[in-house]
Structure formats: C-alpha cells, structure tokens
Image: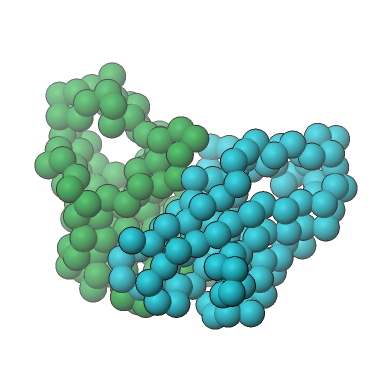
Chain colours: A cyan, B green
Amino acid sequence: GDSVTQMEGPVTLSEEAFLTINCTYTATGYPSLFWYVQYPGEGLQLLLKATKADDKGSNKGFEATYRKETTSFHLEKGSVQVSDSAVYFCASNTGRRALTFGSGTRLQVQP
Amino acid sequence: DTEVTQTPKHLVMGMTNKKSLKCEQHMGHRAMYWYKQKAKKPPELMFVYSYEKLSINESVPSRFSPECPNSSLLNLHLHALQPEDSALYLCASSQDPGQCWEQYFGPGTRLTVT
C-alpha cells in the first residue's frame, strides 16, 4: 500500500538556520504530494503542494520539489524563524482513498 | 476562501452522554472527511463522504455515527464513548473525490471523555 516516511524529530534549530525535513513516499501510480503544518492546538494547514514530477511547491519561504527518481519531497527553508515552530506532516494522495500521512516532524526554533 | 469551520472547539462529555460535532464548508467541495488525531500522531482517517454518500468507513466503532445532511455540512454523532476516544477530531474537505486534490482542514474539536 501507499506510505510516507519522514525523518524523526524533534528538529531543533537556531533562528535564521537552514531547514531540511526529509520525506520519501511509496505509491502505486502518480500521487500528488503535500506538506501540511500544525501549530499547537490547531488543525492542519496546507503549506505547499506539487502534483507531478519536477514540480516545485513554495509558500512563505518554504519549498519542496517532487523528485520521482528518488521518490522524495523534502521540505526546505533558507532561514527559519521562531514562528515556524510547529509539527510538519508530509502527505501523498493517489486519489484512491484519502491522504496518506507521514508520522510528522516537530520543529523547534530557538531565538 | 478555503475555510472549513468546526464546532464546538472543545467538548467534555461523560461516557453516557450523546453529543454531536459539526463541520461546514462553503467551497463547493464534494468530498468531506472525518479524522481522529491523538497527541504526537498523524491524523487517522475515520470516514469519507463522496457526493453526500458515505464511501469509506475505516472500521470505526458504531458509537461514532457520521451524517452528511447536505453538500456543505458534515456531522459526527457521538454516543457511549470511552475515555480512549479522547482526541482531536478534524474535519476536512476536497474538491472532488477520487482525484489527487489537496484537503482543507478545520481547526478541530478537542474531545475529552470522562
């Protein structure tokens, strides 16, 4: 079946550091890929998406590129802020069922 | 507008109570979802409604009863819950079932069963 694997957290960074959160997927067919962010006590917000190979999703300084050859969709940001502290979920959707989520990665940014 | 609303925000109920969670979207989406999320875990799919009809039930206990009165509304009726049902319940919607669309989530209802 479909699955998404994310790097274990928590990831702790200083403000203005570079962020990478790794995500790989397995799927039958050609999924769309997403990053969602969840702030404490809130629901999930769509951060960015990519629907086909080599697409780059971007939003609020975050980027991720759909790499079919490595089945990856790593999240990056050049300079993190304290306000980026949250849990980040990578997800895939092949259209057969619903979103398949990774386990989530907690990001803590220190001033 | 990509807003999904959920009420109530918090709910405390006893094991003999009956309560309902409500979800609403006005984006014209034809697929709606209920998820359950425990602390430090990803959301787990419970139910999927496709064009107002229940299309997926992930073997959820019958003490959870979903209802879709119209294309904009989704309810989750709760009865005789157990303490282990305490969790964040998330509603989501997407444009078209069976396609690879993104889902938009509501803020959730934090449920505590005492």
Q: Quadrant location of the C terminus of chain B?
A: top left
Res A85 quadrant in image: top right
Name the residue nearer the viewer: B27 or A43: A43
Residue at image x 49%, y 35%? B40
Farthest left residue in view: B62
The image shows residue A49 at horizontal and vertical percentages of 57, 69
Above or below for B105 versus A42: below
Q: Is residue B37 visible?
A: yes
Name the residue nearer the viewer: A82 or A50: A50
Residue at image x 67%, y 52%? A21
The image shows residue B23 at horizontal and vertical percentages of 34, 54
Name the residue nearer the viewer: A47 or B107: A47
Image-based side of B22 in relation to A64, left or right: left
Residue at image x 27%, y 50%? B46
Q: Is residue A39 visible?
A: no
Image-based side of A96 in relation to A105, left or right: left
Residue at image x 59%, y 65%? A72
Res B13 quadrant in image: top left
The image shows residue B83 at horizontal and vertical percentages of 27, 23
Above or below for B95 versus B43: below
Farthest top residue in view: B114
The image shows residue A77 at horizontal and vertical percentages of 77, 57
Image-based side of A105 in relation to A100, left or right: right
Instruction: Please tell me how many numbered marks the rendered image carries.
Output: 0
Res A23 quadrant in image: bottom right
